[in-house]
Amino acid sequence: MKKRVVSVLLAVIFTASIFAFAGCSSSKSSGDTIKVGFLGPLSGDVAIYGKSAQSGADLAVKEINDAGGINGKKIELVAYDSKGDQTEAINAYNRLRDQDEVVAVIGGVLSGETLAMKDIMVQDNMPVLTPTATAVDVTTDAPNVFRACFLDDYQGVAAANFATANLTAKTAAIMICKGNPYSEGVGAAFSTQFAANGGTVVDQESYSASDKDFSAQLTKIKELNPEVVFVPDYVQIVGPILQKAKELGITAKFVGADGWDGVQTEYADAAQGNYFTNHYAADSPSEKVQSFIKAYKAANDNKDPNSFSALGYDAVYTMSDAIKTAGSTESDAVVKALNNTNYAGVTGNLKFDAEGNPKDKEVTIIKIDGGQLKFETTIVNK
Amino acid sequence: MDKNKRKAYIINTISVVSLYLVFFILIQTKVMNKYFIGIAILTCIMIIMAMSLNIVAGFLGEMALGHAGFMAIGAYSSAYFSIALMDTGIALPNIVVLILAMIVGGIVTGLVGFLIGTPTLRLRGDYLGIVTIGFSEIIRIFFINFAPTGGAAGLKGITKLVTFNNVYWITIVIIILIFTFGRSKQGRAIISIREDEIASEAAGIPTTKYKVLAFTVSSFFAGMGGALYAHYQAFVEPSKFTFMFSIEMFVIVVLGGLGSLTGSIIAAIILTVLPEMLRGFAEYRLLVYSLALVVMMIFRPQGMLGRSEFSLTKFIDSLMLRKDMKNSIGGGEAQ
């Protein structure tokens, strides 16, 4: 009997909670705040990306509100967790639109979740600015979806331009990870641009994501002796490659893409003197970057911001600028304003092309020196 | 047809239709917006997934932890089929395309279930659990590397065919099919294997055949659920169908009661709606969700309904009976 009472009680609590929570969380957009949604993985394996972007976005919201808000109205950032899962992302987006009645969305953080939500977002004509989703399809056939980060191809082109112009390289070898769209995409873009710049790609080696030993590929590269080796991949693979290259005594400069971020901590020795493309540099002389880093550290227990935070920060500023210029929160007006955006942000100057991708955005080149990331230069692809 | 059966049919039909009307009115009057409709559709899909898993986990009493893999096969095969069908240019009504896609998804998944089930069902308990985990991981990794369905980037360009109206009725039909399967000769044979494999074998039941049958039917319906999922999301990515998703479905079945189909339905509704309603609490919602599971398992380890089924007819009867008793004895409590 006692057990039955407990189970009945549980059932009542379950049902009651459903209605109670449904009621309390549906506060509508009121007159003096502008609600902007944020979507990203805040829990699970990839939570680090969502959390980083969110902390950047939060900082921007705080700054904008302290400076008086948008046309006198405060911004309220409604952040929901997508868990990096498509179903969750769609539910969360539906909730942002129907329950919270947001006027614009910053997100998603990952390509997969953004692609899953894209169709509904286009139907709703919701102004969307994703800080970090790099998949090409995210903005195709979606006039209301924009992105703040440059595309994978774009940084491949920038790396090639850097290799020819700044490193005066005539020959290059490329190492790509087979089956990784990021690595393959950036590698192909580099290859095409380097050839177009008058250089010769002497060799293209590939490996798989689970490989641990790269001596075969690197020995071949050593024999061909190119001036530059381009390795667009993530730290956990780039590190061992650089180590092996050092053992073999390869003298070529290694160049990489934004996946290298973090290589300076564990592989400082092996990575010494090499370069990679990134969204921004912490020691950039730009005043905008320095004030962002200072504010970010103050707000986040002295933690260093990463590219995700910087892009989240820029995304909120871009969106708030667009709403300000539009003078209203109507979707059409905001989308139109976003199309005409010209915003000087932490990660460079942000303008959008017809697809909604950044146009002529600066790519920062970083040099690894003594375990530190040093700002080298910025490249704008023409 | 005997009188009780007819009465049960009438009561159930009335309740199903009136539930639909309630939803219909709520949607028409815009009380239920797209957000709630989305959750309702997802709940229907999870009901199908949980019920199909219950055939193996509940009726057959085996540990199957690879349901997400079967769902993935259903989702991918049906989506691939419907994209190809749309490309041929044959103009078919949406509902026909959806049903064809579901049948394709179901059959392909059923076949794979049959192929996997035949060798693996020689194992029991934990061993079978591990083997099914392995297979579902293989399926996921296969789709990550399989270029024709988009690989890791996912399959795009699926037409969104699922609406609340069609998913509601499809769910009702599948519920009826699984219920009748459970009560059929085959269903009873499967339950007898759960109760005592040696005794049922001695009674002349070909146990291996019925085990494989249960596994195949379960994966068939899982494939149908996967097909609905693909045509609701309009985008499928292999990263959705992880081991954790299989566990999520297993939790629904255990919480509802292993062997109780109505339990699965109720648990699927609660466990899909609850995390969504807790969204306002950000990080705490996962905590509340997990805590609810722990509390539930401590106080009711056999699940909400145990092995019994909730019957609307019996419920109404017991209400009537109580009233009658009160009238005749004069306010005496039943039991």
Image: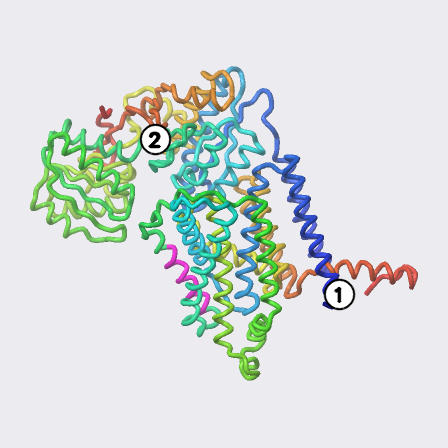
In this rendering, which labeled residue sits more in front, label 1 or label 2? 1
Relative to B26, A155 lies left or right:
left
**Three-letter amino acid code at disc 2?**
Cys
**Which of the numbered marks, if any, corresponds to residue B4?**
1
Asked whether B250 or A314 is in front, the reply is B250
Q: Which residue is denoted by mark 2 in the rendering?
A: A149
The total number of labels drawn is 2
Q: How is the image coloured?
A: rainbow
Q: Is residue B133 magenta?
A: yes
Asked whether A309 or A22 is in front, the reply is A22
Considering the whole magenta stretch, tell me its main secondary structure.
helix
Q: Residue furthest front?
A: B90
Q: Position of residue A207 (x, y in %)?
A: 21, 50
Q: Is residue A140 above or below residue B253?
A: above
Give the CA separation, mark 1 to mark 2.
66 Å
Asked whether B76 or B290 is in front, the reply is B76
| Region rendered in magenta | B127-140
Q: Are there few (<14), some (14-19), or many (20+) residues within 10 Å of tag 2?
A: many
